[in-house]
Amino acid sequence: MILPFFKKIQNTPRGFRIANTVFFFLSGFGYSSWVSRIPHIKAQLHLSEAEFGTVLFAFPIGLMLTMPFTGRLLNKYSSRYIMLLGAVMFNVVLALPGLAGFVWQLVIILLIFGASRNIFNLSINAQSLEVQKLYKQSIITRFHAVWSIAVFSGAGLGYVMVSRHIAPAHHLLGVSVFMMALTACFYPLSIHNEPVPVKKKFFSMPEKNLIKFAIICFVSMACENTMYDWSGIYFENILHASPKLTSAAFVFFATAVTLGRLFGDYGVMKFGTKRILLYSGIFITLGFLICFLLPFIYPTIFGYVLIGIGVSCVVPLVFSIAGRSSKLSSGSALTSISTIGYLGFLLVPPMVGFISEYLSMKFAFLVMAFLGILMIFMVNKIGENE
């Protein structure tokens, strides 16, 4: 029954869309599976928080170092081939952290893991832009909604594995095999695109017309990762909330992100991409301002929901605009924007920690509100024909 279905949808818009959806799921599911076992891998290696924090930094280093390399691959080859390379690397390396017996081994694994995640994520986003071209209505944010749903699924499986005392090595190996099987099944359905060769320096800043998009992505990724890293600590330190309420607040934020992505395409079709980006900046700004001005449990939860809706659709929509650029290939555009965007993802959350240390986390959230204002300013610079 399955094989005839695959033959029926192969080389059709529906087949391309299903394949890209599966690969977005694999990206989120694999990443959250790894994250769910971080405490146990830390315990296995007998590392302190500071030592393990230093080890974890290998992941973003591997990710950032391969940005220009991935851009060149996407300019030279079809994104489906790069997606296959990234998926296989990602699936294989995912099985290794639980097997690391020494710190140096985990550092090398995380360097390669970060590199594979970069190759995989940029290529599936490039694929999503190709699939979007086949549809008149917007479908781009739902791919990212699937990624968010996959994160919930991977975290849920991780909870079950921890509850049943399954070792990280066995858990991650099982996930790796499962993901490799899905990769083999759905790769033949992926869309083939002809790359557009672009002569660029290996390291280069985004083109002038892409800088505003890069800054918008910078703000969105910075705000999203700040919520991942600090939303719980804000509830504990500023609001003195119980552990249950702290967990519930983050669930509200994550749910708002997922729902925003699920319904984002409908918003784009009704209001247009630029207006949705503008609303996103307004929601981000209002959300952080509410947390700053009304540091009480329920107003803060409401602020978290606004922030979640605000960050939910920004990256996929900016990618979709940049992918329509007539001056650059989609691979070059995505790489240029992602390089700046990931700097926000990596650099701003530590800045929140410094501000919290010397002033208060409330003032750190106020700074995030000003970043939201910067995003609104940049969105207003987007032309109607972009």
Image (cartoon, rainbow, N blue to C red):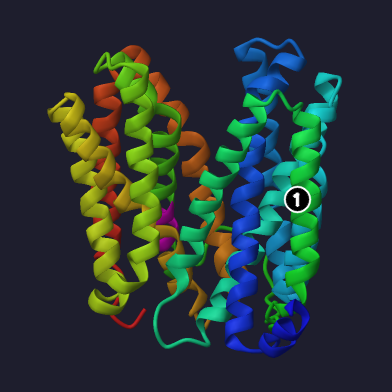
Nearest the viewer among 198 and 322 is: 322
Query: In the image, is 372 to the left or to the right of 166?
Result: left
Q: Nearer the viewer, residue 13 or 104?
A: 13
Chief SS of the magenta region: helix
Where 342 sits versus 77, above or below?
A: above
Task: Name the spot of residue 179 as percent of width and height, x first.
Answer: 74, 54
Q: Is residue 364 left or right of residue 261?
A: left
State the extent of the magenta-drawn residues as a range: 212-217
In the image, what residue occupies the spot 23% across and 32% down?
Answer: 366
Which residue: 51% across, 59% down? 146
Specify whether residue 355 is in view: no
Pinpoint residue 290: horizontal percent, then vertical percent. Answer: 16, 35
Q: Residues within 10 Å of mark 1 (few under 14, many from 20)?
A: many
**Residue beneath the point at 53% across and 88% down:** 134
Whether residue 312 is visible? yes
* Residue 327 % position (x, y): 53, 80
In magenta stretch: residue 292: no
